[in-house]
Amino acid sequence: MPTTRQSTLSFGGKELTPPPAPPLETPSTSIALSELNSSMFDDIDSPIPTSESSAPPTAPPSTAPSETSRPKKRRPRTSYVYKYMRDIDFHGNITDSEGREIWKCRFCSQTFDITNSTTNPGLHLASVHGLKSDSPANTIIKNVQLNIQQATDTAAANPQKRRRLNTATPEDRPLDPDTLEVLYVKFIASCNQPLRLVECEDFRTFLTYLNDDISTWLPGTHDTVREWVMRQFKIEKTRIKTRVQSARSKVHLSLDVWTSPSNKPIMGVIAHYINEDNMLDCTVLGLKEVHGSHTGENLAPTIMAIIKDWGIASKLGYIVADNASNNDTMMTAISDSTIPAS
């Protein structure tokens, strides 16, 4: 046991001895810690490395799934061969008895293993059925050629009398004016371009660079372009009306009323029927502005006018709308009315 050193003090020539210091008490916490043994903290499941074996402890087995047990992520189906595949189940998979993914031809009984590649189905479609995959560039070129051919056919079936805008001779104009009208109207309609685009100097400069003869037949004012649009609209409507009236089934209508961004109520009417090619077809018959309140009695004349305009009263089938109460009143008004023949 360690000894305690006694110190003395002098005061007035006398030595004073301080009282002995009390013995140090060990805190109860220290006593409890002193009674602990390092072996009490050892994990009984992990062996302690000894001097004879300096190898690190082995890690417990991992519970994460191994690479071989993880399900393979399906690659996106981008090949065109899947469009000509038959017997696809709910998940779009076809497997054989061994679990391999297979491809079955829609046109014949040929079957291929496509677990790793779709090359063989592509070769089969090309060599046996004449179906090949086109690149995006070739698809665009084909669509452009198809649009030009359709415009040429429409222009040939509907020739127009035109006033020449300059003194170019017929031998100097390679452009067909009727085809130009069809293509230009389709362009401004599908791309939502303004009628005044034709008056833009930079736009005409670009077209003139492509073909010097463009100024011969392309109008210089938006008023003429408006006439082109209305003329082509009437031509297309006549063509579509013939197709609807020649339907092999009843002509059924679906309709609803929306509010345009300019707060105008617009009624849309769509016809559904089987066309002459025995294919399900649909056609927009009208987008009419509804004037006044949206009561059934006020909506019925708009529907009746569209039915009369398209001449489908004798082929009219079902009319489908939402469950608003005014539609019930509208149907009653249509049933009680007589639609005159177109």
Image: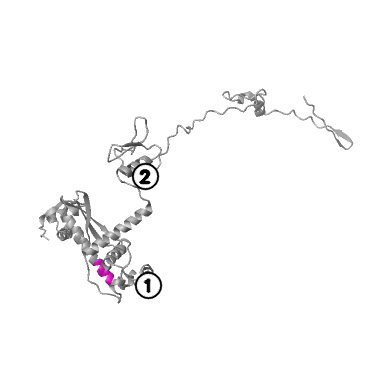
The quadrant where residue 158 appears: bottom left
Dominant SS type (magenta): helix
Q: Check disc 1: other Cα within 10 Å, few if <14, some if 14-19, many if 20+.
A: few
Residue 323 appears in view: no
Question: What's the image's color scheme?
Answer: one colour
From the image, tell me which residue sits under label 1: 201
Please report the bounds of the magenta region as a residue range: 223-230
The front one of 263 and 141 is: 141
Residue 340 tag number: none
Q: Is residue 279 above or below residue 267?
A: above
Q: Check disc 2: other Cα within 10 Å, few if <14, some if 14-19, many if 20+.
A: few
Q: Earlier in the sequence, mark 1 or mark 2?
A: 2
The quadrant where residue 295 appears: bottom left
**Residue 90 point in image, percent of width and height:** 31, 38
Residue type of the residue flagged with mark 2? Ser
The quadrant where residue 184 appears: bottom left
Residue 79 tag number: 2
